[in-house]
Amino acid sequence: MRHKSTQLLNKPRVFPVYISKSKTLTHVKPRKDSDLSKKAQVEEMFDNIAHRYDFLNHFLSVGIDNWWRKVTINSLKESNPKRILDVATGTGDLAFEALKRLKPDSIVGLDLSEGMLSKARVKAKDRNIAKIEFVKGDSERIIFDDQEFDAVTVAFGVRNFENLEQGLAEIYRVMRPGARVAILEFSKPAKFPIKQLYNFYFKYILPVFGRLVSKDATAYQYLPESVQAFPEGDAFINILTKTGFTSCKNRPLTFGICSLYTAVK
């Protein structure tokens, strides 16, 4: 099988143009004082925090993020995917979970941040894992051919798309007919007292602790701002439907702190 992640980088591609309707999300950026695009800022941010990302993920979520990933991957079990794309793979935790639970033939982890990918490759090497390939690339300009994957996963990544509709359309494009997508993303609890506790934690605790540990002043301020701007629940289901997906479902997890969205091409 040819190594598409290398060959397609230099292959001319024609992409359709999608006009973002999520202007609020598009304009929420890590650094308000920078003229760089959101995409460039997100890449820079994750490069900066890659060295502490895994620790902060698990610590700040009190380890619940591990269960969220298991639920996400288990949602794909019935379809038995053989080739999986993990978009915005970060340090690879969702890809590793998919390999463990689904036992596919191959997985590609795609991410903008070389810093995060370097951590993922080290983890794969330490675990002697050869079935996962970690590739640097743009989630809104995916470097793979049409209808190449049996399943696509995304964990806490679609918030960071510069153009949400463009990214979802690209995910749709690389999926085979009948393939499933599973998207895990933060949401906002609506019920008392979880809503109040969640808002206090996100506004006052998470940014301070995240800044102290990661040494990045913007990353954990951007996180709650991007969560607030994200079109969650029915609004996101509507976007998935407009993209072309069917059987779109939303499963709130842990009192609505995050949500699992699943859909079929």
Image (cartoon, rainbow, N blue to C red):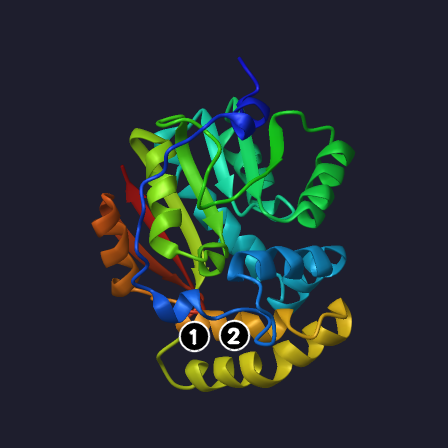
x then y, percent, for residue 195: 42, 82
Where is mark 1, residue-wise?
228
The correct choice, above or below, for 196 with respect to 107 in the image is: below
Q: Is residue 186 left or right of residue 165?
A: right
Question: Does the CB distance between marks 1 and 2 fall below 8 Å?
Answer: yes
Q: Residues within 10 Å of mark 2 (few under 14, many from 20)?
A: some
Give percent across and percent down for residue 140: 44, 46
Give the answer, above or below, for where 22 lies relative to 207.
above
In the picture, residue 263 is in which quadrant? top left
Asked whether 15 or 196 is in front, the reply is: 15
- Going by the numbered disc 2, the residue's amino acid type is Pro
- Rendered location of residue 144, percent (x, y): 46, 29
Q: Quadrant of residue 208?
A: bottom right
User: What residue do we see at 69% from left, 72% from top?
Assistant: 210
Query: Which residue shows up at 49% across the image and 79% down it?
Result: 198
| Circle 1: residue type | Gln
Of residues 188 and 197, which is closer to you in this image?
Answer: 188
Residue 224, numbered label: 2
**Is residue 187 in view from this perspective?**
no
Residue drawn at the location 62% of the way across and 35% of the way down:
134
Expressed as whole percent of the image width and height from the top left, the position of residue 218 reads: 64, 73
| SS at circle 2 | helix
The dot on residue 139 is none
In whole angstroms, how far apart are the C-alphas of marks 1 and 2?
A: 6 Å
Q: How many marks?
A: 2
Q: Residue at x 60, y 35 (%)?
A: 135
